[in-house]
Amino acid sequence: MARTPMAIPRRRPERIDPDLMTTVLEPFGQSDMNEGMSETSPTEILLVDDEAALREPLADYLSRQGFVVTQVGSAGEARSRIAGGHFDLVLLDIMMPGEDGLSLCRHLAETRRMPVIFITARGESTDRIVGLEIGGDDYVVKPFDPRELVARIRSVLRRAGRALPDAAEAVVYEFEGWRLDPLKRRLIDPEGAAVSISSAEFRLLMAFLDHPRQVLDRDRLLDMVQGREAHLFDRAVDNQISRLRRKIEPDSRNPQLIQTVWGGGYMLAAEVRKTAERD
């Protein structure tokens, strides 16, 4: 299946073969590169795409923006890399031979808590909704401006960590016997067992814990959790809430913690305490 090439930047304006590249960008300064770095360590990205002609120049571009990029050509390779290392974010192509990106994202949502941005040639809203519903955090549609991708990477990383307290003020949320450690993204049930939640479920739960006993409508929840084109995905938040209920409710068909307020949205009907986390 033919794919539309992605726009890849060059260091100086020049004419590019339109069959290979579609956009020429001006060079970036050192400040742009530094934005990919944190004060402690650089952001590590796993780039998963079966097309080396697209994957390799994109990895080079992201590296020049200060990110540490590991690139693989299949979902199987991605699983091996993830099992043996740490990544802050995954850039994931949907259409790949063998296991596709949606299947891999579903696996990551069930077993890991790392943000996922889809890189896809599919532009229909239905495909985007499916990706977001199974745990994706954002998407870009080929061909795209790499500067937009960098902006979305930084936006997703900010959303993933924007609710986290400073290390000096680390706290744990407690509600109805449950404990959530935001810094470790670790959810503990009333029996003391760890419960795996996806990055989208984590952000959704944080939204409720920061606003207990307050009615949050879909628009506000989507702005907190997705932050992009929320008007397209009002049903996506319903599916995320259903998944979260199955994990924290004794009976998800009769929810007592995350309650539906007809005509209003959703509300966490629980008392929330914040306690200092001590080593």
Image: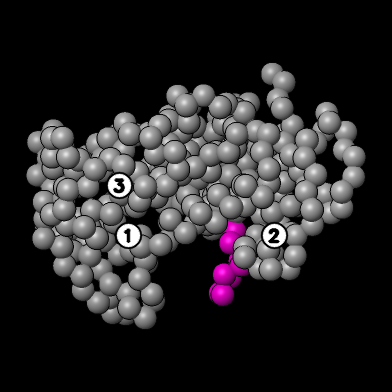
* Residue 40 sits inside the magenta stretch: yes
Q: What is the distance, in whole Å, between disc 1 and disc 2 at their CAs?
A: 31 Å
Residue range in magenta is 37-44
Q: Position of residue 16 (x, y in %)?
A: 87, 38
Nearer mark to the viewer, of 1 and 2 = 2
Question: Is 106 in front, or is 83?
Answer: 106
Say if mark 1 contacts mark 2, CB within 8 Å. Answer: no
Regarding mark 3 in the picture, which secondary structure is present there? helix
Q: Position of residue 39 (x, y in %)?
A: 56, 75
Indicate the amino acid at tag 3. Arg
In the figure, 133 relative to 211: above or below? above
Q: Position of residue 18 (x, y in %)?
A: 84, 31
Crowdedness of circle 1 by 10 Å Cα count: few (<14), some, many (20+)? some
- Residue at horizontal 57 percent and vertical 70 percent from the top: 38
Indicate the amino acid at tag 2. Gln
Circle on res. 65: 2
Q: Earlier along the polypeptide chain: callout 3 or callout 2?
A: 2
Question: Is 241 in front, or is 52?
Answer: 241
Q: What is the distance, in whole Å, between disc 3 and disc 2 at their CAs?
A: 32 Å
Q: Which residue is mark 1?
A: 186
Answer left or right for 184 relative to 102: left
The image quadrant of residue 91 is: top right
Q: Earlier along the polypeptide chain: callout 1 or callout 2?
A: 2
Regarding mark 1 in the picture, which secondary structure is present there? strand
Q: Earlier along the polypeptide chain: callout 1 or callout 3?
A: 1
The image quadrant of residue 255 is: top left
Indicate the amino acid at tag 1. Arg
Q: Which residue is mark 3?
A: 220
